[in-house]
Every structure is written in structure tokens, then in C-alpha cells.
């Protein structure tokens, strides 16, 4: 199992921890954990793509710290709309962004948004079903990502996640 798979499994455990009346603390942690499953998968794949070879493993760990949640959200918003910055669109020869990649990007934005609510909005209550739906969304995004990770479009997306602010002129 990968770390992302472990996180999703942990999120499901948390969402179902109290059988009758789930505690908000359990549900909130499950939401946050499902977001981090996707976040860590994408940053790990980016590090593997951009730093290859076994000897650079310690570098990969440091490299993953360069990813900023806000930058990743902006990049995902652009990809979800099918309109990445021109330099990234040129990299994929101006082909349309695959629908599956748009959905992964959209899931990232949705999961990050609900993670912020879970972590910071104490007036917000979550239902078990709502949380299970978010976990399912993360699981679907991870499943779709598996077929995209080694494609030109997927690799372009990974570059965008790191460099969006620099290449979008912001």
C-alpha cells in the first residue's frame, strides 16, 4: 500500500469510528486526511518525475516541501477549466486537457475547500455521509490519476502544480 492509500483507509476508519453518533472531531479529521491523500500522491509523483533515480530519495523529500497549497489550488482551477497557462498548453501541443485530468484537478480544489472548512470553520457540522462522499471523491481522483501520472498531460500538470504562480505571470 502507498502512503496515500493508507491515508484513505485511515479516513474511512475515522468516518466510521463511532457507529451511532459520529464525533465532529472524527469526521473533520477524516475530511482533512482524504485531502492529504491526494496532496501527498501528487507531490510524491511530481518529485519522482522531476528527480529520478534511487540516490536522490532524500532530495525528493525536501523537494516535496516546495509545493504550496495555494499555488496548487490555482493550478488545479486552471486545469479544471481546461485552460492552463499558455506555456503549459504549448507543452501538450494545444490539445484539450483530458476530462479525467480536469476531474482530478476539480477534486483537488473541492477537497482542499472542504478541508479548510473542516479545519477552521467550527460553526460547520459534517454528516457521516458527506464525509464518506468526500473520501470517495479522493479515492476516485487517485484512481483516475494512476492512468494519467506518466502521460505528457499528467507530467505537465505536475509541473503546473509547482510553478503555476511563476508561469502564469502572477
Image: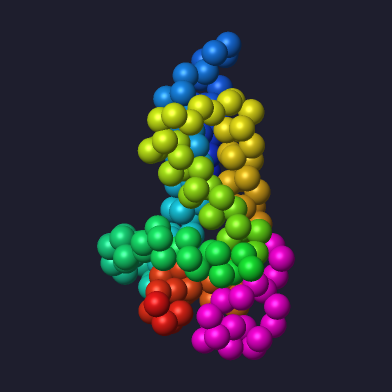
Q: For the point 40% across and 60% down, which residue is it? A: 70
Q: Is residue 37 visible?
A: no
Q: For the point 48% across and 73% down, which residue is it? A: 160
Image coordinates of residue 53 in percent, x first then y, are: 39, 71
Residue 101 as seen in the image, left or right of residue 17: right
In the rendered image, the vertical position of residue 40 relative to residue 152, given as above or below: above
Image coordinates of residue 50 in percent, x first then y, are: 42, 74
Region of the chain picked out in magenta, as a range: 82-101
Q: Nearer the viewer, residue 125 or 84?
A: 125
Q: How is the image coloured?
A: rainbow
| Quadrant (top left, top right, bottom left, bottom right) of the C terminus | bottom left
In the rendered image, the vertical position of residue 139 relative to residue 73, given as above or below: above
The verdict on residue 151 being magenta is: no
Q: For the point 70% across and 70% down, which residue is it? A: 98
In the rendered image, the vertical position of residue 57 relative to residue 122, given as above or below: below
Residue 49 as seen in the image, left or right of residue 139: left
Dividing the picture into quadrants, the one containing residue 122 is top left
Amino acid at each position: 500500500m502507498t502512503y496515500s492509500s493508507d491515508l484513505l483507509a485511515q479516513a474511512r476508519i475515522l468516518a466510521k469510528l463511532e457507529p451511532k453518533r459520529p464525533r465532529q472531531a472524527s469526521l473533520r479529521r477524516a475530511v482533512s486526511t482524504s485531502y492529504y491523500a491526494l496532496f501527498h500522491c501528487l507531490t510524491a509523483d511530481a518529485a519522482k518525475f522531476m528527480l529520478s533515480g534511487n540516490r536522490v530519495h532524500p532530495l525528493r523529500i525536501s523537494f516535496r516541501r516546495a509545493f504550496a497549497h495555494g499555488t496548487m489550488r490555482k493550478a488545479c482551477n486552471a486545469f479544471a477549466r481546461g485552460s492552463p497557462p499558455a506555456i503549459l498548453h504549448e507543452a501538450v501541443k494545444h490539445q484539450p486537457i483530458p476530462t479525467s485530468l480536469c476531474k482530478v484537478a476539480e477534486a483537488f480544489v473541492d477537497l482542499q475547500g472542504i478541508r479548510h472548512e473542516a479545519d477552521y470553520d467550527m460553526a460547520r457540522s459534517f454528516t457521516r455521509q458527506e464525509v464518506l462522499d468526500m473520501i470517495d471523491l479522493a479515492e476516485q481522483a487517485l484512481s483516475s490519476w494512476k492512468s494519467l501520472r506518466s502521460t505528457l498531460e499528467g507530467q505537465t500538470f505536475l509541473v503546473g502544480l509547482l510553478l503555476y504562480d511563476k508561469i502564469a505571470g502572477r
